[in-house]
């Protein structure tokens, strides 16, 4: 099996796992990965994570031209923006996960630091998550908003929509987006209960010890 064939199988396996655990539903969500030749494989538009076909993934060449497979997700501007601004990105995952979307609707969430410091793991996997405003699905302005961050964030939260996470490979991106959703769930479960969060010193210790990218 070629490296690209393995990558296609791996992408579909991760997508199916996310779907089976309810982290995205119906035909929502999209996922992409960088190929060895600098191109991309991308989930097609209007498809379910639970039923992706490796042979039908959209294929882009290194110049960004669609050269094979089905029509790609309409959220390509998001994926392209992360690959363009983060040279280490090997995969991008966008979900419509319920708890993170619910948290994005709360009026007192900090747009520069979407997730409260409840555990060290979200810090380690994600750094600080930027909450972006609402955009119409597929709006190219979403990509412009990500480019405006100049590669300083590995993850963003689209208000009333869903998280988008870039990682060095598929496993890293999937693990990080899972951590984002679980931290959002914890934030909602403890909302109004005055939970004991990590202190500023504890946050700094995590950032320093684990060499976390930390914008501000």
Image (cartoon, rainbow, N blue to C red):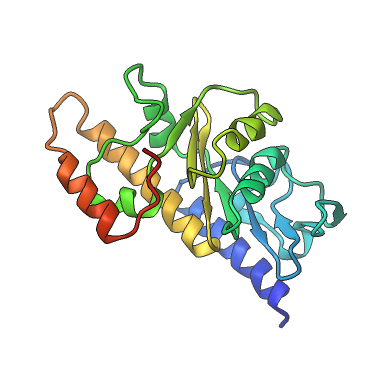
Give the number of marks: 0
Q: Where is residue 63 in the image (x, y as percent from the top left)?
A: 83, 54
Q: Where is residue 203 in the image (x, y as percent from the top left)?
A: 22, 46
Residue occupying image coordinates x 34% and y 24%: 109
**Figure quadrant of residue 89:** bottom right
* Residue at the far bottom in the pictured view: 1
Considering only vertical position in the picture, is 130 above or below 182? above
**Which one is in front, 211 or 143?**
211
* Residue at the far right in the pictured view: 67
Q: Position of residue 150 (x, y in %)?
A: 57, 40
Considering only vertical position in the picture, is 44 above or below 117? below
Residue occupying image coordinates x 40% and y 30%: 112
**Figure quadrant of residue 98:** top left
Residue occupying image coordinates x 71% and y 42%: 76
Q: Is residue 190 left or right of residue 146?
A: left
Residue 198: in sight, yes or no? no
**Figure quadrant of residue 56:** bottom right
Residue occupying image coordinates x 23% and y 47%: 204
Residue 210: in sight, yes or no? yes
**Which one is in front, 117 or 93?**
117
**Which one is in front, 37 or 204?**
204
Considering only vertical position in the picture, is 70 above or below 147? below
Quadrant of the image containing the N terminus = bottom right
Q: Where is residue 198 in the image (x, y as percent from the top left)?
A: 17, 42
Quadrant of the image containing the C terminus = top left
* Residue at the far top in the pictured view: 107
């Amino acid at each position: 099996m070629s490296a690209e064939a393995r990558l296609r199988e791996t992408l579909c396996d991760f997508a199916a796992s996310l779907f089976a655990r309810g982290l995205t539903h119906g035909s929502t969500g999209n996922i992409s990965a960088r190929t060895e030749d600098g191109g991309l494989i991308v989930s097609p538009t209007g498809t379910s994570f639970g039923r992706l076909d490796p042979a039908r993934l959209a294929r882009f060449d290194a110049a960004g031209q669609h050269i094979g497979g089905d029509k790609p997700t309409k959220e390509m501007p998001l994926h392209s923006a992360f690959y363009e601004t983060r040279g280490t990105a090997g995969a991008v995952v966008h979900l419509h996960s319920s708890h993170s979307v619910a948290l994005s609707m709360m009026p007192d969430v900090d747009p520069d630091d979407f997730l409260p410091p409840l555990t060290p793991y979200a810090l380690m996997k994600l750094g600080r998550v930027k909450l972006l405003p609402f955009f119409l699905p597929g709006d190219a302005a979403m990509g412009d908003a990500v480019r405006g961050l100049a590669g300083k964030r590995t993850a963003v939260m689209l208000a009333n929509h869903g998280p988008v996470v870039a990682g060095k490979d598929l496993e890293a991106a999937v693990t990080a987006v899972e951590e984002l959703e679980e931290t959002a769930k914890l934030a909602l479960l403890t909302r109004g209960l005055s939970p004991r969060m990590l202190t500023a010193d504890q946050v700094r210790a995590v950032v320093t010890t684990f060499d976390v990218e930390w914008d501000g």
